[in-house]
Image (spheres, helix red, strand yellow):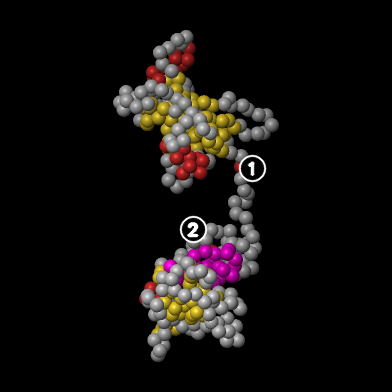
């Protein structure tokens, strides 16, 4: 803390004065794009904007009733906490909207400063304290923050919890890195024809039929393969795609050089051994056929099907581990 300015010392020693000590509050949200909200317990109008606000150090602090518990200190090793109350009675206020949009502002940094109304030209406050919002409570008449210093003992250590058969990463986000292809066909003319069990493992001739649309052009155009003499698109490897919107046949499926593709039909099998046949379903529903997967069950097998084992988040990981 800097040495207290002489002007503040003079005001502190006055028996009576025309000015007032003001609390200024800054709340800076956490995250990649932090935003700072500013409030002051001052009911005077700003001379420039004629609005209830206080201008200090080039920033406007909007009027808001503020009150705070006494800060207590403990000799038993407890971290100090106190309640900071903002008298906001409007349930549709901007502050409550910000709290709703930012998870209660928990984790945000608050800066509480004390300045004097007759010395707003000073750029250093008389009191300047930092803390973190630990909890937020909304009542009909106020917004109440519990603020203090967070205890590291209340946080998970180590940061990541490894489970041998379960990936901890959120599907398709930064650590998973799976990217679903944009190849998609949505139509109300898609029907499902149950297949025949051929007696061979994983071979059931389930058929998806599209009366209007082009499967190869819309979905399978970027998949390794080639046309055969009958005009079928023969795939080089197992190609995964997903079905959404059907009454009973949603899921993930595989097509390969046995289960060929035409512009209006594709023969498929389920992604697991011994898959069931389709339920017969006529056209009418708005159904989407999309290359790739739209979710994951976080197992190693699912990661292998998605060709993404290098990013598997289970213990001890794929690269150099027992699953490598």
In the image as oriented, which residue stretches furthest toward the top?
Answer: 15
Give the side of residue 322 with respect to residue 38, left or right: right
Residue found 67% across the figure and 29% down from its top: 75
Q: Which residue position holds label 2? A: 174
Residue 59, image x and y in percent? Answer: 37, 31
Q: Residue furthest bottom?
A: 229
Question: Which residue shows up at 49% across the image and 28% down it?
Answer: 87
Q: Within the image, what quadrant is residue 263 found in?
A: bottom left
Give the residue pinned by disc 1.
153
Mark 2 packing: few (<14 Cα in 10 Å), some, or many (20+)?
Answer: few
Report how many numbered discs are placed on residues in the image. Answer: 2
Within-10-Å neighbours for mark 1: few <14, some 14–19, many 20+: few
Query: Is residue 299 covered in magenta?
Result: yes
Identity of the residue drawn at 42% across and 23% down: 42
Picture coordinates of residue 11 (x, y %)? 44, 15
In the picture shown, does residue 134 fall above or below 323? above
Kindly tell me whether residue 175 is visible in this rendering: yes
Image location (x, y in percent) of residue 200 = 59, 86
Residue 209, quarter of picture? bottom left
Q: Nearer the viewer, residue 73 or 210?
A: 210
| Residue at far right of view | 76
Placement of the C terminus among the 4 image quadrants: bottom right
Of the residues under marks 2 and 1, which one precedes in the sequence? Answer: 1
Q: State which region is magenta.
A: 286-310
């Amino acid at each position: 803390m800097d040495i207290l300015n002489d002007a503040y010392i003079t005001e502190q020693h006055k028996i009576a004065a025309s000015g007032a000590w003001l609390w200024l509050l800054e709340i800076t949200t956490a995250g990649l794009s932090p935003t700072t909200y500013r409030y002051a317990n001052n009911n005077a109008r700003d001379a420039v904007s004629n609005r209830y606000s206080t201008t200090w150090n080039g920033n406007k602090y909007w009027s808001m009733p503020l009150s705070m518990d006494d800060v207590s200190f403990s000799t038993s090793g407890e971290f100090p906490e106190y309640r900071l109350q903002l008298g906001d009675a409007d349930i549709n206020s901007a502050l409550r909207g910000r709290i709703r949009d930012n998870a209660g502002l928990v984790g945000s940094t608050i800066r509480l400063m004390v300045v004097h109304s007759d010395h707003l030209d000073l750029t250093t406050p008389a009191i300047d304290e930092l803390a973190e919002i630990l909890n937020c409570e909304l009542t009909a008449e106020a917004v109440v923050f519990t603020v203090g210093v967070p205890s590291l003992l209340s946080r998970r250590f180590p940061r990541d919890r490894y489970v041998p058969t379960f990936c901890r990463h959120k599907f398709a986000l930064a650590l998973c890195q799976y990217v679903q292809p944009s190849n998609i066909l949505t139509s109300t003319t898609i029907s499902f024809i149950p297949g025949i069990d051929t007696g061979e493992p994983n071979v059931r001739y389930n058929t998806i039929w599209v009366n209007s649309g082009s499967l190869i052009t819309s979905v399978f155009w970027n998949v390794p393969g080639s046309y055969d003499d009958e005009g079928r698109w023969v795939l080089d490897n197992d190609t995964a795609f997903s079905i959404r919107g059907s009454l009973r046949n949603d899921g993930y499926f595989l097509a390969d050089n046995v289960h060929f593709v035409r512009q209006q039909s594709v023969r498929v099998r389920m992604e697991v051994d011994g898959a069931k046949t389709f339920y017969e379903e006529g056209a009418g529903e708005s159904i989407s056929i999309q290359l790739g997967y739209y979710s994951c069950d976080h197992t190693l097998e699912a990661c292998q099907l998605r060709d993404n084992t290098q990013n598997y988040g289970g213990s001890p990981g794929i690269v150099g581990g027992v699953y490598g």
